[in-house]
Image (cartoon, grey):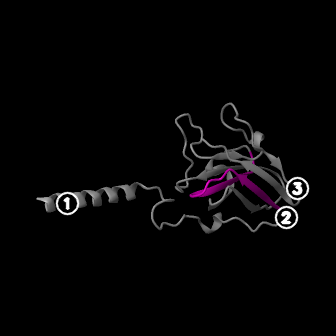
């Protein structure tokens, strides 16, 4: 009788383990690599070339740090409005990410820490970010949807150095 109960317990434990491992997000499942595509890798930082050099503060470890570059108000913060996306593993409190520029101009940067590495920004019920998020110029909480003009900056011939402080949800 004891052996039968023990076997049921082992079976239950095995099924529970399979279910729990299947529910883990990619960033903490066993041995899974982060999905960063070759065109999403940042450029080598160089203060003597035309690039946007973004210092991101307030990053936690695990998952992916996403940095999106926008060059106008049309489709700001939408996928089709991004000029470039850079993704790196989130490992430290602060990261520096660089993106080469084709030409000087007016740009804005949006950054979020994709904690579960599913390549999507989680939103709360009120449509505010559910993961750490920040914009260039670090605008205070806007009323309504963030505007390009609140985050826009102008680059010179050698680009620009900006700082983005992630806000925790």
The residue identified by callout 2 is 47
Tell me, yes or no, whether the highlighted magenta stretch contains residue 103: no
Badge 2 vs badge 3, beta-carbon distance below 8 Å: no
Badge 2 vs badge 1, beta-carbon distance below 8 Å: no
Residue numbers of the magenta segment: 48-72
Query: Which secondary structure lies at badge 2?
Result: loop
Give the image location of residue 80, x and y in percent.
63, 51
Question: Foreground residue, 168 or 9?
Answer: 9
The residue identified by callout 3 is 156
**Upstream in the sequence, badge 2 or badge 1?**
1
Query: Which secondary structure lies at badge 3?
Result: loop
Single out the residue that lies furthest toward the front: 2
Q: Nearer the viewer, mark 3 or mark 1?
A: 1
Badge 3 vs badge 1, beta-carbon distance below 8 Å: no
Q: Quadrant of residue 38?
A: bottom right
The residue identified by callout 1 is 6
Classify mark 1: residues with Cα within 10 Å, few (<14), some (14-19) or many (20+): few
On the picture, is 149 further left or further right than 91? right
**Upstream in the sequence, badge 2 or badge 3?**
2
In the rendered image, the quadrant that contains the C terminus is top right
**Upstream in the sequence, badge 3 or badge 1?**
1
Question: Foreground residue, 57 or 85?
Answer: 57
Single out the residue that lies furthest toward the right: 157
């Amino acid at each position: 009788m004891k052996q039968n109960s023990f076997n049921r317990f082992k079976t239950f434990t095995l099924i529970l383990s399979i279910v729990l491992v299947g529910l883990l997000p990619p960033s903490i499942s066993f041995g899974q690599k982060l999905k960063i595509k070759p065109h999403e890798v940042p450029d080598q930082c160089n203060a003597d070339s035309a690039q946007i050099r973004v210092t991101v503060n307030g990053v936690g470890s695990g998952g992916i740090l996403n940095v999106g570059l926008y060059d106008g108000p049309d489709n700001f913060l939408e996928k089709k409005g991004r000029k470039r996306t850079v993704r790196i593993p989130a490992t430290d409190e602060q990261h520096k990410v660089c993106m080469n520029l084709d030409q000087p101009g007016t740009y804005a940067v949006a950054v979020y820490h994709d904690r579960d590495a599913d390549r999507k920004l989680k939103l709360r019920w009120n449509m505010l970010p559910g993961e750490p998020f920040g914009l260039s110029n670090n605008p205070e909480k806007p009323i309504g949807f963030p505007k390009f003009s609140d985050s826009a900056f102008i680059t010179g011939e050698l680009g620009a150095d900006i700082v983005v402080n992630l806000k925790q949800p």
